[in-house]
Image (cartoon, rainbow, N blue to C red):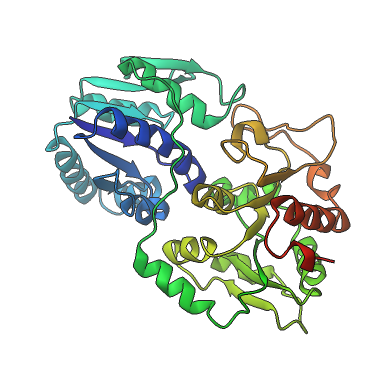
Amino acid sequence: MHILITNPFGIGDVLFSLPMVYALKEQYPESKIDYICNKRVADVLKAQSDIDRVYIYEKDEWRDKFKRSKTRAIRDFSIFIKEIRRRRYDIVFDLSLSREFGFMLWFLGIKLRIGYNYKNRGIFLNRNIKIDGYSVKHIVEYHLDLLSFLGIDNKYLDKKIAISEEYVERAKGKIASIDKNNILVAVIPGGGASWGRDAYKKRWADENYSQLIDFIARDSKVSILVMGDKKDSLNFTIPKDHKNIYNYIGKTTVLEFMALVSQVDLVITNDGGPLHIAVALGVPTISIFGPVSENVYGPYPRDSKHRVVTSDLSCRPCYNNFKVPKCDSYNCLSDIKVDYLFNEFKKHVKLLRLKYEDKIS
């Protein structure tokens, strides 16, 4: 059996779909499961043994191609379509919420097309669940519910994402000089890249993270990796005069980033892809959620090793049907003070009963 999954969104959304992949593979162990995704997440999916083949689809790149040359773009898209058609897929799970994707899958002749009917965009899917957005349960559970069309129970399989041993060994080499008796904490100020220009609406302020790092670094029994992509490095100030802070912002590929995260004891970050990478690797986390519901987009499954920090405002979460209402203040983030988060860090370390808990003052 050949199964295709389409999901053009960010790394968090893609990781939310992997439990569905695991369930399909358990039910059909001889099946081939392929995936259409964007360029940012392709390498992550290629590293997963349950996924056989990965196709890269970048909407903006196709638009640019059509602007430059319609003839060449049509030729290239025809090659792309033919490559997929050759696999003769039996089933597709379309997570794109897109009418265009649905049409393409219908055009490819895939007989069973399963997905969501969001704003009537699922008209080309012959098995669909009508939704207004993700709101009443976690996205993982929405995706697992799609398996009911194949008579498969929506059972969650607890499985960690894979990283090649080569990358793990490289990561160990990078941190070899760090005192192994210390708590190793990754602090990741970025995240939320899939929101584009609105990513700031999901992020605790950079200056807060700088101050938090300074507080944590005063304890000589803690080592800190500051991580993120190149854009995060443009405005972020790393506290000076601490020998236990190591700067990896903008210095890793996605796979190198994952491998480093797999070696730490705790991750502190915003609602976004880095959080979900840590959760998928089984690494304990402290995450900061503002407008978005942690019950829908937070760590899954819920576990005491994942601590979610929110402000106590009646207006949050306000992100609904994939939209954030206009807000002058975003107090849901600014109300979370550095002192409070630092105390949450200390409590969480002790809750986890790490071998170094007596070293946190």
197 and 260: which one is in front?
260
The residue positioned farthest toward the left in the image shown: 86
Q: Residue at x 73, y 32 (%)?
A: 317
Q: Residue at x 27, y 47 (%)?
A: 55
316 and 309: which one is in front?
309
Q: Is residue 311 in view?
A: yes
Q: Residue at x 57, y 83 (%)?
A: 177
> In the shown orientation, is residue 123 left or right of residue 131?
left
The quarter holding residue 87 reads top left
Question: What is the x, y in percent for residue 108?
Answer: 19, 29
Question: What is the x, y in percent for residue 75?
Answer: 17, 46
> In the shown orientation, is residue 261 left or right of residue 360?
left
Question: What is the x, y in percent for residue 209?
Answer: 75, 63
Question: What is the x, y in percent for residue 60?
Answer: 40, 48
Against 359, is 77 above or below? above
Against 179, is 215 above or below? above
- What is the tally of numbered marks visible in this picture? 0
Q: Residue at x 83, y 49 (%)?
A: 336
131 and 354: which one is in front?
354
> In the shown orientation, is residue 121 left or right of residue 236?
left
Against 65, is 357 above or below? below
Rendered-image quadrant of the N terminus: top left
The quarter holding residue 361 reads bottom right
Q: Is residue 121 in view?
A: no
